[in-house]
Image: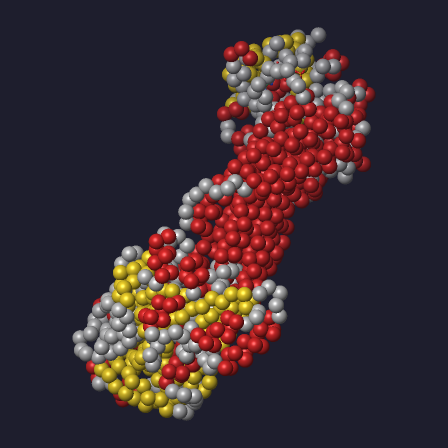
Amino acid sequence: MEIQVNDISKIYGTNESQVIALNHASMTIFESDFLSIMGPSGSGKSTLLHIISGLDKPTSGSVLYDSTDIHNGSDKQLSAFRRQKIGFIFQQFNLLPVLTARENIIMPMLLDKKQPDEKYFKRLTELLGLKMRLSHLPHEMSGGQQQRVAIARALIAQPDIIFADEPTGNLDSKNGCEVMKMLCDIREKMNKTLVIITHDPRIAEMADRRFTMIDGELTEVSAQ
Amino acid sequence: MKSYLSLASKEIKAQKVTAVLILIAVILSSIMTTAVGQSLGILQTMRMEQAASLNGDRHATFHQMTEEQMLQLNRDTRLYDVGSLINVGCSKLGNSSLTLYVREYMDNALDAYPSISRVKEGRLPVSPFEIALPESALQYLGENISIGDTVTLQAEISLMNGTIPSYAYSAEFTVCGILESNYIGYSTGTLNAVSGEGTASALLPEEYLLYSTDLKVKNTSHFQNIIDDLANKTGIERSNIQYNWILLDALGISYEEAGTSDTDTGFSFLTFACIMAGALVLLAAGLVIYNILKIAITKRIKEYGTLRAIGSTQGQIYRLVSLELFILCGIGIPVGLLIGALSAKGILIAATGVLNPDLFMAGSTTELNTMIDGTSANHILIYFVSIVITLLFAMLAALPAARYASRVSPTVAMSGQRVKIKRHGRKTKTIRNFEAYYARLNLKRGSSRTVITLLSLVMSITVFVTLQSFIALLDTSSRVQDMTPGDYAITSETVGMTPESIAKIREHEMIEHLSTTKLSVYTQDKNGQYPIKLGFALQSWETFQVAGLDDTRLSSYIADLSEQDKNDLLSGAACIVKNPIPFAYEGQAVETTNFEYNDTISVNGHELRIVGIADYPVSINNAGFSNGVQITVNDKMYDLLTGSNHYSEVYPTLETNVDNERFETWLDRWCKENPGSHWLSYLQTAAQLEESFQQINMLCWGLILFIGLIGILNIINTVYSNIHTRIAEIGTQRAIGMSADSLYKTFLWEGAYYGIIASIAGGIFGYICTIFVNAATTDSLQFIAIPYLSIVEAAIISITACLLATAIPLRSIAKMNIVASIETAE
Ligand SMILES: Nc1ncnc2c1ncn2[C@@H]1O[C@H](COP(=O)(O)OP(=O)(O)OP(=O)(O)O)[C@@H](O)[C@H]1O
Ligand SMILES: [Mg+2]
């Protein structure tokens, strides 16, 4: 797996109210990379993530996933791509409030008209310490637990790469640490690629490759 | 959980209020579609049954055929229910305008005519010279005729094309049965007798022995082709083919000379009214479903964004949203179907109450209701169509919401903002009343929701105002219909009542007023002469009638006469004319006499100027009109014209608060002293009429309630979800120091704005619709008085409803802990 981000820009609005959220950003993500992106609020981090993951389209430039342009396909192809190749972890957890933890986790499989692999499901929930919480509704769980359910959901379809936009932003430092540890642990065990946006320098430190974003410009901070 | 689709049922369970509101809308609309569908089904069945009994259960009849031609039709495999008859002859009944037709039916041909073959006494004829006579013809053929008696008929027979002169004969028949009379015979002036097979061949010369064959065509889509082919093969002239247009129209079979049947008007009016009411409710319910679903989806938009982000396709979201509504339809439609089916007959009975039963060829409203009650229209197909229409409408209403949900950008899942807010004007003017200002801003922020809610409210108010004025209109027309000339009618058709005996009634202590009618009906004799001297010629079949009315009734007979005309009418120098009713016989329009305003006619040596053409004839005993020319003059003139001063019918109106029963006993005695007379009470009929107006009134109120309920449903939903989606906002406002009082005001203003705007628009639309309803009932477009009262009522009701819908959920929120309400945001 390899993702090539070629010179993408994103411009919102027109004329005076124009905002350049991304300014000719380029990068390449390789198999089992662990990337972190840092930067001040409003610098364009989320925008970049949305475009790489196929949630949004760039104004110019292209994103190649194993040399196919992901923004060129139909909505069906793009949806299938997100379902099978990509996992998401959101800052606000975004669990479906009417579904139990278990149902929330297996949702991506159901959308793909598949049933989850029970062995994998068990391993995943054990690793995330969710075994006792599977029949709970989201509002019956703590923020940390909710985020762990979201991580399980991101991993259930065995994607190649996981995107996380400030996964600890809504958690206190203790819970945030715990969730990050689990995430890193799993990434290592399952050999997944992870792209994480964060404001926390300690989390950014954990990554192999670190990027910073300022006013839509992306730069890689050379290792050590 | 086996499929992502189970998410739909879970969402429904989680959002009970939304689900219940949608459910109500679905139930209401399926009640309406079922009720309308069933009513239409009942109407159609009735129409077909009546058409068949009225004019024979046949598609067409071939007339004037030889035996050879008749047999040829009998052998044709494309036809069924083929039956033949022979005209034996027709006979004038005494000096009445009635003609008795004697026919001989071969095999089962009589089965096609249920209305003339109901045996009251005895049996149908089987051998030659046996005859079954209609009951109403008996009095003209001799005293006390009963089964087994012989009657002599002076009859004649002529051919339709008139190539040979008519053949007259006299024959003796044995009465073997008495047939039930039917009212149709009277109105067309014909009665039907059935003679036994073999009579015609024994009586008639061969050239008069012609067959008429009734038939039905199996493949009705090629009806005309088959008829044409038969005509060619048998060599029968087109003019000898008679189409049974009443039945063909009812069945929807297309044929050469499409008819415009009178029987249609009543049916099509009801059909139209049914469909309009149904469409209205469907539209209103559709708006509710649209609005509620749209709001529900907006509230959950972040969830749909998340689903999109984790990889669901647009189609899957579409399916999820539609399935939610589908489940609700699955619960709501059967309930609506049941209620709708149960109420259909009741609704129809109430609706037919205001229409003249004649339109349905029924004798009375009671008879009509019995007919409706006896019709079962539980066709599976109709239910199916109702279901499909309701579903279709519901799904159509859900479409925008589903589309909205599926089009949501997956990035919504990431951002904190739930709802996009549009605000065009961003400059702040001086704010005088913060609460009202803030309420206006809130109205604008969900503009499509505001528009839909307003629309549905406006519709409710429009319907309310329109139906109210419709009811008022009915009330006035009911008063007009109520104007029977008196509380009773005392009639003597044949003998008449002498002025001396009428004077006794007039002098009775309980009588407040007495209206009178004199009526004479003249028919032509063999030489084309009437027993009264006329200065003009009439068609041979036309009757000439003179009616004499008392002055009060005469002057109110035609409302808009000029002073001059009125004076002439009252002084006896003028008359009002009722022209013959145009009609077609065997497919051909028959020529009728037609007088016009200001023509002068001479009757019995008196010159009379025509000052008015009447729409309705003067008739007695509620009988039909023996088609012809009728002139109406004042009482004295009648005596001069006819040379008779006998009364045909008088109408006493009693003083108020008198003992009716005592008067009726007196009347019974009076009738014994005056042979040939009998009386009838209108008090009963008036009460019946009143009852059917009550029913239609209730129907209208039912519809108002229905639509009103839907409107209120919409307000409750809008306001409720408005408040609930903004709990966090409300919490914040409270936190920064907004008092509970001020908070209340904001939302109450919002409710008030809905009510006020909707009332104004609804009032205007209601007035416009009122004008149209008025135009439809009076046939003239005019600006009528603005129905202030109902507009004000509607305004008060809707504003109150809006305020209540706001106040109730707000109470609980104002009491809520500020911190708790802020936290509900996440
Ligand atoms: N829909 C939009 N319309 C207009 N401008 C937008 C829109 N979405 C984002 N922007 C602008 O694009 C820029 C980048 O936004 P983005 O959300 O990527 O920032 P971010 O780096 O993720 O910030 P944060 O750390 O606060 O999440 C911002 O200046 C924002 O104002
Ligand atoms: Mg961001």
Residue A21 appears anywhere in the view = yes
Give how far across and how far down residue B629 sits, in percent: 32, 66
What colour-coding does the image apply? secondary structure
Task: Using the image as rendered, state which of residue B687 and residue B490 is in the foreground.
Answer: B490
* Residue shown at the point (40%, 75%) measured from the top left: B646
Task: Using the image as rendered, state which of residue B785 and residue B777 is in the foreground.
Answer: B785
Give how far across and how far down residue B587 sits, in percent: 29, 65
* Residue shown at the point (72%, 14%) measured from the top left: A199
Task: Using the image as rendered, state which of residue B684 and residue B641 is in the foreground.
Answer: B641
Residue B63 appears anywhere in the view = no
Give how far across and how far down residue B461 sits, in percent: 57, 41
Q: Is residue B78 above or below residue B304?
A: below
Q: Is residue B70 left or right of residue B678?
A: left
Q: Is residue A5 left or right of residue A197?
A: left
* Residue shown at the point (28%, 70%) measured from the top left: B604
Where is the N terminus of chain B found, in terms of image quarters?
top right
Where is the C terminus of chain B found, in terms of image quarters?
top right
Q: Is residue B566 left or right of residue B346?
A: left
* Residue shown at the point (33%, 88%) measured from the top left: B152
Q: Is residue B555 above or below residue B442?
A: below
Q: Is residue A124 above or below residue B500?
A: above
Task: Using the image as rendered, state which of residue B577 and residue B178 is in the foreground.
Answer: B577
Q: Is residue A171 above or below residue B314?
A: above
Which residue ends up furthest to the left in the rendered image? B163
Give how far across and how far down residue A164 sits, in percent: 68, 22
